[in-house]
Amino acid sequence: MENDYLCLHEIVKAAQAKLDRNIWDYLVGGTESETTLRRNRLAIDSVALRPRVLNDVSQVDTGTDFLGHRIALPVILAPVGSLESFHPEAGTAVARGAGGFGVPFMLSSVSQPGLEAAAQAATGPKVFQLYVRGDREETDAIARRAIAAGYDAFAITVDTAHYSRRERDLAKRFVKRWRANEPGAMHHQAALSWADIADFKRKHRIPLILKGIGTAEDAALAVEHGVEMVYCSNHGGRQLDGGRGSLDVLPEVVEAVAGRAKVIVDGSFSRGTDLVKALALGADYVGLGRLYLYGLAAGGADGVRRVLEILQDEAERALGLTGVTGWAGLGRGHLHRGAPLVAMPHVHSAFPLLAEGY
């Protein structure tokens, strides 16, 4: 597969050719006007890099640590519903692709083949992510299963109190199968509160991640409740429309956390230079969603791994050209905020050659 795909945009193109239109729209789309989706990319594109020179960068290390594991890149494969829509091997393919390369993956509770089967396929660190669809007893039961299956951390998504209006689906009268199967279940997610988080922390000895934090206030509350990882995310622009881009939110989250927890950020990160920007602003890890799904659709586990190989190559070069030998060498002095845009922000504005026929 190495010679099949030399650029990330080639994998994007292959994924689009293989996917049903409804699933492609689910992958690339957002909510209502898709303003939050576009602002994710806008926030990244409006930051320029300030490279330093005449440093010895002959040896660059792209690795970092994650919950006691050495990983190849500071990235996590984010939880995505219905992975089986992109490839028949679903979560097992993602687990093998992530483990084969050397990064963690997060399995969504609304993806196949279930937490135990995905755990058995994993060869590296793994996180189970829950959409709350039952009471505390049900959440406790799922947490115990995840712990028994050897998951390194447990994530609860907190930005889905109401399911959003995704107009690409509505306009085509397309109802996703995994949505049709859970009528009436959303009220548990809508009723979720900080008291539930405190209850979880009292009962379970597994690192907890809250995914969907979008303000300094909630980041501070998360740390006060003992959360080990704060996941700064707007659900890829799929939930609240009219929101801020994740990279714009990141600095206030990092400041509020103040080193008391690890910080993950996602939201249209697509290039090695994007990773440099996020880590320079204080993130510990970057969540990848759409990007690895292109690889999954294009080639299963091998496609996922190939996406990560290209991204690592980009990241290594970006670090060296920025003048550092690893992520710890980055700081805000390497960034220039408010750079002029060179393209209208879009889910694929990081891949301009897509529009040029390459």
Image (tube, rainbow, N blue to C red):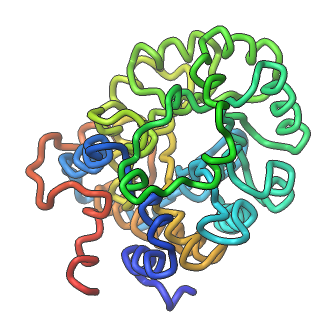
User: Where is 119 relative to 333, above or below?
Assistant: below
Find the residue positioned furthest to the left. Answer: 340
Residue sitting farthest toward the bottom: 3
Residue 330: quarter of image: top left
Q: Nearer the viewer, residue 43 or 347?
A: 347
In percent of the image, x 50 and y 73: which residue is there? 20
Picture coordinates of residue 92 (x, y %)?
Answer: 75, 63
Q: Residue at x 51, y 59 (%)?
A: 61
Residue at 49% x, 57% y is 174
Quadrant (top left, top right, bottom left, bottom right) of the C terminus: bottom left
Q: Where is residue 212 shown, x and y percent of the image? A: 49, 31
Q: Residue at x 65, y 37 (%)?
A: 183
Q: Position of residue 184 (x, y in %)?
A: 65, 31
The N terminus appears in which quarter of the rendering?
A: bottom right
Horizontal side, residue 280 vs residue 111: left or right? left
Q: Residue furthest right?
A: 148
- Report the number of numbered marks: 0
Q: Is residue 103 above or below residue 229?
A: below
Where is residue 297 drawn, in percent x and y? 56, 73
196 or 25: nearer the viewer:
25
Left or right, 86 with reference to 215: right
